[in-house]
Amino acid sequence: MRSTKSITAFGLMLALLSGASIAAPNHTPADAGVINKERILYWLIKRGEVSEDASDSVKQAAVEAFIARASFAQPKEPRMVIEAEHERLQKAKTSAVMRAPAQRVLADADVTKTVKVLTVLIDFPDLKYNNNGLTASDTDMYYSSYPASHYKNLLFSTAGFSGPQGQTLDSAYQYYQAVSGKTFFFSGDVKGWYTASQNADYYGANDADTGNDVNVTELVKEAVSLAVANMSAAELATYDIEDPYDLNDNGNLNEPDGIIDHVMIFHSSIGEETGGGKLGDNAIWSHRYYVDQGTQGYTLPGSSKKLFGYTIQPIDAATGVCTHEFGHDLGLPDEYDTTDNANKDGSPVGYWSLMSGGSWTGAIPGAQPSGFSPYARSYLQTKYKGKWLNEREISLDSIPKSGMEITLNQAINQDAVNQISIPLPAAQIAFKAPYQGSYQYYSGQGNMLTNSMSFTTTLPSTSEKLTLSLQASWAIETDYDYMQVKVNGTAIAGNYTKSINAINNARHIITGKSSDISTAVGSDAWVALEYDLSAYAGKSVTIEFTYVTDEAAIESGITIDNISIKQGVTERYADNAEVAGKATLVGYSRITSTRPGAASRYLIQLRSHNGVDAGLKSKGFDPGVLLWLENASYSDNNVSDHPGRSLIGVIDADQNMIGTLSTDEQIRDAAFSMVKQTAYSGDNNLDAVSLFDDSLDYSAPLQPQSGMQLQQLGLTMQVVSQASDNRTAVIRLSNANAEPVPITPSDQESSGGGSLGWLSLMLLGGFAWRRQRQ
């Protein structure tokens, strides 16, 4: 049996993977990371939905309204995907403990990974690929024809492919070679074009409630079935060489499991994320998802193989969209704000990472996608080994007050140190106050938890009513997660329990939100819970408060205070949480008005305009030393819900606002540098900023979603030298609070690709990947 130990490593990207997640949908998700607002406006004008002469504000409102029709709340990841990640992280931690950092680096650098992608092209009876109606102005990736050979070169060419003007563009193969230090091989073949059974708008029509596409999984099943019908069993078998979920529990992930490993679909329309072409909002929105999750995939007709996960892209896809969606296939989360909040400005990642806006960088938008965030690099390094990064971890305590200088290489150079990691002490996070007194019991929060708090007592032998009462405040994902009160292992009914639910058949549960109960009191919605214990009179009982969560959608959990057992009106047991040791806590904690934060760390990169980062120049993103904060207390980058706090985000060196532009534009000058910034429309503060000091305010108070809330630990970082092409830089780290003790290399740092410290972060903190629900 696969272990289901309680950890919070499934909170998010993998990441990714939150409160924005929703239950099993009848639609497919929309990926906001691949939105192109300029192209949306173009199609709104071309379809006559907005006038070309309209004011900028009217045009902007029309674009936002088009985007707002879709829901970006991501459905949950299938449980077997989450469980596999759980197992992988546990094994990775064990492996890291058993090997010294230098041994890990040498061994991991020699590991290569080859994936084989089955790519299928499908058009529609009313929208043929060779009669698509596109003109050169309709898309930046316009070609007079789109044969299978185009997609084969776009994805798998080792020498690049021909762009719309005959220029040579990098393929997805070349991108993944570059970001992995030539250790990840993206291979495959292309089948089709085939024609679907229904017209295009049947598949891309929108769900009435969410605005998302309703029948895309049907299209995917049709497309792959058509392709497989023209393949021999031997050829099809070459696309099943991995067992990523370890379905047979033998620990071998490099063997067939009966499921096609990687599937990419291309359809014959413009994607909805870029305006949808003539289909408008009935076009298909690019995304990563799954088919037939309840049966762990769809058995392909005439074959023993199943189809499960897939990505889908439009006819005019550039390398950026393809590599972004495949990043999800590899397990990465989105790094943008996935909420549907109308007032969101965007997360502090922007074009700095492929898994946010970086899929659209380049002179041809999307043709030069930017590199990964350090969070994503660490994930890929730990999961696939190879040379995704070359990290040096430095403990905060080892940084002297007098400073230490470190040479940092550009992020695209994996042969030398290209990432610095500084683990930080866990911070306390502001939380609700206890119902009474100074302490309360807290369930904790996260995914795949089975946390408990218990005590044992002997109940009096009496004919009077015995009542367990307590005060509780909770926010628990309805039905999927729950709290139960158990007596000697059996759940019992209470005054606000739900007798049973259809999701998991758990009985007598507390779920949903206490604020929805009419008798709740106070701003934190405390509710008096009561349970009848009369049936246990005269017995020794263990009373347990069990908190159980599933694989995604993190809510805050439950807090408990003022536990009491009464015989009639006489109190026989009391625990107001003020005295430690009265209850046995497994996963629960005894807290005040703050809760323990998870692990966090600073991550330092040197970004240039070289290699895969060349496209950053097209967006006005200046090179330099980029400082990130990775914080496992948060499972997503939904900064419209929690401004200044996110799973991963850049710390903007220049805190002068660029008008009222979105975060994507605000952080174009986020890099610390000795070089004056380049000119940018609306940016009137172009002075170089070379010093980071954590005592300063980086929260962007005028637009908090663009800022980061930091601990004041006495840390400074100064860029002291910088190559003209940003291939190298020297930074000086100083810790004003450091003890004046000798420092040796052994206690100062560890080097490696994906450090043990990062693994601890993942296992102790909260790791998100794309949460898509079964």
Image (cartoon, rainbow, N blue to C red):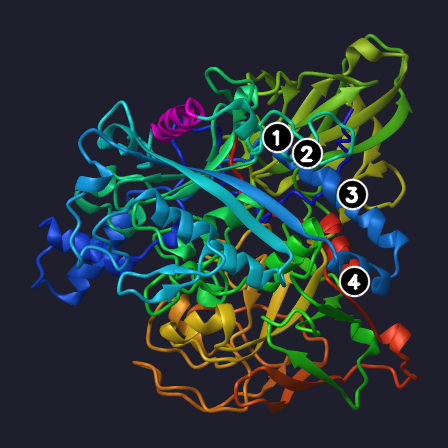
Q: Tag 3 or tag 2, which sits nearer the N-term? A: 2
Name the residue type under label 4. Answer: Val
Q: CA distance from mark 1 to mark 2?
A: 6 Å
- Mark closer to the chain start, 4 or 3: 3
Give 316 or 625, whichever is nearer the viewer.
Answer: 316
Q: Which residue corresponds to the image point at 43% horizontal and 82% vertical from the top-left?
A: 656
Horizontal side of 129 relative to 749 (left or right) equals left
SS category of the residue bearing label 2: helix
Q: Taken as a whole, is the magenta stretch helix, strand or loop?
A: helix
- Residue corresponding to mark 2: 83
- The label nearer to you, 2 versus 4, is 4
Judging by the rendered image, the residue that carries numbered circle 1 is 79
For residue 520, which quarter of the picture?
A: top right
Question: In this rendering, is residue 631 above or below 585?
Answer: below
Distance in Å between CA atoms under marks 4 and 3: 19 Å
- State the residue at coordinates (88%, 18%): 459
Q: Is 217 covered by the magenta stretch?
A: yes
Image height of 460 relative to 524, above or below: above
Residue position for label 3: 90
The Cα–Cα distance between marks 1 and 3, rounded to whole angstroms, is 17 Å
